[in-house]
Structure formats: C-alpha cells, structure tokens
Amino acid sequence: MGLEQAVTRTEPDAVAGIGFRRATTAEEIVALLHRALTEAGLTPDHLTAIVTAADRAGDPALRRAAAAFGLTPLGLDPAALAAADPRVVTRSPRIAALRGVGSVAEAAALAWAGPEARLLLPRIASAGATCALAVPAGTPSLP
C-alpha cells in the first residue's frame, strides 16, 4: 500500500450567481460560466454551486447548464438576495425595480457563499445572462 498525498489547492472554490432572461439558452449560460471562470483564473472543477433567484432555479436552460458542470442549480428567496444586496457592487436600475437588488448574479453568489463572502468576479454579461463569482470568507486571494 502506497502513501497518499494530500492535495493542497491554491485556487479558491467559487460560487456562481446567475441572472438570466427566460429566452436564454443553456449553451449561452454555459459559455458565460466558462468565461467567468477563465477571467477569474479558475477551472470548472473550482465551481461548487450555481445559484439564482428561487423562482428561476428550476428553469430547464439553467438546469441543463448546471448539469454541464455536474451541479444542480440552487434557488434563494428574495429575503436572502436582499440581505446580500449591500455587498453588491453592480447596480442595474432595471433589475433593482424588478428584483429589489442591484444584481441578481452578485447577490445570489454572495448570499450563498456566506455573510463575509467577497466577490471574486463582479457581474459579467452575455446577451441574455449575467454571472458573478463569490468566495467564502478566509479564501486565499489569487496571486
């Protein structure tokens, strides 16, 4: 029997917050998630959760996109999103009027990652979706 080595990860595990319009395809969401991970210097195996507003978590396109990463989308209620809103850095007047938060993507990522979480990547957008990445408190910064 050989010795097992512990693998120490130097990159953080990330939570992806997603906002999207109803007509957005799974392929567009997957492409945006890959772009976000690349911009943050991460690989898909660092993605631990895909989170959105509770009323959108069951959308077939989001479910297929999450499945491409081996995940199931998670939904947060409006109160959880609102609690994270003070930490959101992007402010969309349209989303604020509809959802009561500046960015669904940022609020969802921050809310799921915890009360002391920080954004690793603020909201980026494609034609029909937005994505932000957050990491829990105490996660080491990338060089």
Image (cartoon, rainbow, N blue to C red):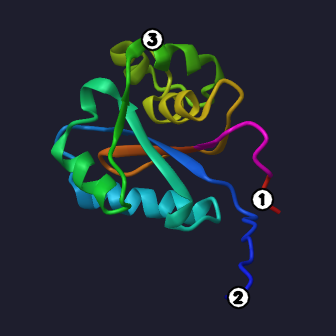
Instruction: Reply yes or no: does residue 135 show up in magenta.
Output: yes
Task: Look at the magenta stretch and give its main secondary structure.
Answer: loop
In-image side of 120 versus 143 (left or right): left
Badge 2 marks a residue whose secondary structure is loop
The x and y percentages for residue 23 are: 16, 44
Residue displayed at 51% across by 55% down: 47
Q: Residues within 10 Å of mark 1 (few under 14, many from 20)?
A: few
Identify which amino acid the numbered label 2 is placed on. Gly
Which of the 4 quarters of the picture holds residue 56?
top left
In-image side of 78 versus 12 (left or right): left
Identify which amino acid the numbered label 1 is placed on. Leu
Residue mark closest to the camera, 2 vs 1: 2
Which of the 4 quarters of the picture holds residue 110?
top right
Using the image, tell me which numbered label, if any, was put on residue 87: none
Observer able to see residue 110: yes
The x and y percentages for residue 19 are: 37, 37
Quarter of the image with the C terminus in it: bottom right
Residue displayed at 74% across by 36% down: 137
Residue under circle 3?
79
Along the line of sight, the residue nearer the viewer: 83 or 123:
83
| Magenta stretch bounds | 134-140
Residue under circle 2?
2
The x and y percentages for residue 68 are: 31, 63
Residue under circle 1?
142
The residues bearing labels 3 and 2 have C-alpha atoms spaced at a distance of: 50 Å
The residues bearing labels 2 and 1 have C-alpha atoms spaced at a distance of: 32 Å
The x and y percentages for residue 38 are: 56, 66
* Farthest residue, direction right: 143
- Which badge, 3 or 2, comes first in the chain's sequence? 2
Quarter of the image with the N terminus in it: bottom right
Observer able to see residue 123: no
